[in-house]
Image (cartoon, grey):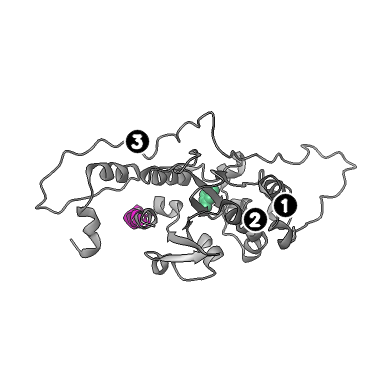
C-alpha cells in the first residue's frame, strides 16, 4: 500500500461503516487480520431521512406563472437583473424573494421553480453545487435526486445533515438557482448573472468552510479553470472563507473509483 493510502490503515470500524454509507469499499492489505465487517448503518440508496418537525430552512417552491394565459395576455415580463449592489444588502427573506422573482437570464423562461438553497442559515459548512436538475426544478430544493442521496450519505459520514439546525448542520446552495434545460452546462453569462445570489448567501451564512463540488462551483468561487484533480488536497479561499474542492456527487455516481478521493477531501474538510 502506498503512503497515499495510509489513511486506509488508520480506519476504525466506525469509519469503515461511514465509508460503506458512501458506497466506498475498503480493502485491507493482506497481512492485516480480517475484522468482522461492520454492518453498514444505512445503504446509500435508501430514501433520504425524514425531515424533523423543526426542520430548518425549507425551500419555498416558486409557483409557475398563471397556468393559462388568456388570449389578451400581456407579453412575458421583460428580463431584469437585480443590481449587484442591491443584492449585497438583502436579508434572507428579501434574498429569497429576489431569487424567486429573478428574470436576469433565459433560464427564467423554462424553470418550474427557482431553487434557493436549503439548510441551517448559520451553518459552519456550506456546500456549493452546480445547478438544479429535473427533480430539484420540480421540488424547489437542491440535491434531491440521485446525486443528492449520495451527498446526504457523504454528509452523514461527516456527522452532518441538511436538516440539522445545530453545529452539525450545513447550508446547501448551487451556483445557478434555475435549471438549465436538459441539464446542459451553465453558460458563463448565466453564472455571471446568478453570482450575486450565491455571494450574498455566503455573506449571510458566514460559514467556517465551503465545500465546492464540481467544476462549475470551483470556477464560480475560485475563478480558475484548473481541473479539480489539480486543486483538491489543499485549502483555497473565497472572500476569506476556506474552500475545499472535491468532485461533484453526480460525477462520483459515474466514477465510483474516485469516491476514495472524495472521502479524503471530506477528511481534509473535517480537519479544518
Ligand atoms: N446537481 C447540483 O449541482 N445541484 C443540485 O441541486 C442537483 C444536482
- Which of labels 1 and 2 is toward the front? 2
Other-residue count near label 3 (Cα within 10 Å), few / some / many at <14 / 14–19 / ≥20:
some
Other-residue count near label 1 (Cα within 10 Å), few / some / many at <14 / 14–19 / ≥20:
many
Q: Is residue 60 magenta?
A: no
Give the residues in magenta. 255-265
Q: Which residue is mark 3?
A: 42
* Percent x, y of residue 1: 18, 60
Q: Which residue is mark 1?
A: 102
Q: Quadrant of residue 44?
A: top left
Q: Mark 2 and mark 1 in contact (Cβ < 8 Å)?
A: yes
* Percent x, y of residue 268: 36, 58
What secondary structure is the magenta-colored segment mainly? Answer: helix
Label 3: state its secondary structure: loop
Q: Which residue is mark 2?
A: 197
Q: Which numbered tag is attached to residue 28?
A: none
Residue at point 48%, 50% (across, down): 124
Amino acid at each position: 500500500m502506498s503512503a497515499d493510502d495510509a489513511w486506509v490503515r488508520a480506519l476504525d470500524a466506525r469509519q469503515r461503516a461511514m465509508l460503506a454509507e458512501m458506497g466506498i469499499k475498503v480493502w485491507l492489505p493482506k497481512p492485516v487480520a480480517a475484522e468482522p465487517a461492520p454492518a453498514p448503518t444505512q445503504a446509500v440508496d435508501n430514501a433520504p431521512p425524514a425531515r424533523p418537525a423543526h426542520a430548518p430552512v425549507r425551500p419555498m417552491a416558486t409557483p409557475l406563472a398563471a397556468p393559462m394565459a388568456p388570449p389578451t395576455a400581456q407579453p412575458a415580463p421583460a428580463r431584469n437583473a437585480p443590481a449587484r449592489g442591491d443584492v449585497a444588502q438583502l436579508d434572507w427573506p428579501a434574498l429569497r424573494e429576489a431569487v424567486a422573482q429573478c428574470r436576469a437570464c433565459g433560464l427564467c423562461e423554462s424553470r418550474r421553480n427557482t431553487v434557493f438553497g436549503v439548510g441551517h442559515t448559520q451553518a459552519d459548512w456550506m456546500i456549493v453545487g452546480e445547478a438544479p436538475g429535473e427533480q430539484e426544478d420540480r421540488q424547489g430544493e437542491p440535491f434531491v435526486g440521485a446525486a443528492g442521496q449520495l451527498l446526504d450519505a457523504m454528509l452523514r459520514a461527516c456527522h452532518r445533515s441538511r436538516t440539522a439546525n445545530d453545529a452539525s448542520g450545513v447550508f446547501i446552495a448551487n451556483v445557478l438557482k434555475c435549471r438549465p434545460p436538459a441539464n446542459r452546462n451553465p453558460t458563463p453569462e448565466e453564472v455571471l448573472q446568478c453570482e450575486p445570489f450565491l455571494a450574498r448567501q455566503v455573506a449571510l451564512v458566514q460559514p467556517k468552510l465551503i465545500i465546492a463540488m464540481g467544476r462549475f462551483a470551483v470556477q464560480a468561487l475560485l475563478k480558475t479553470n484548473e481541473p479539480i484533480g489539480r486543486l483538491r488536497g489543499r485549502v483555497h479561499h473565497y472572500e476569506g472563507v476556506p474552500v475545499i474542492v472535491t468532485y461533484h456527487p453526480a460525477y462520483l455516481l459515474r466514477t465510483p473509483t474516485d469516491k476514495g478521493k472524495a472521502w479524503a477531501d471530506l477528511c481534509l474538510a473535517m480537519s479544518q
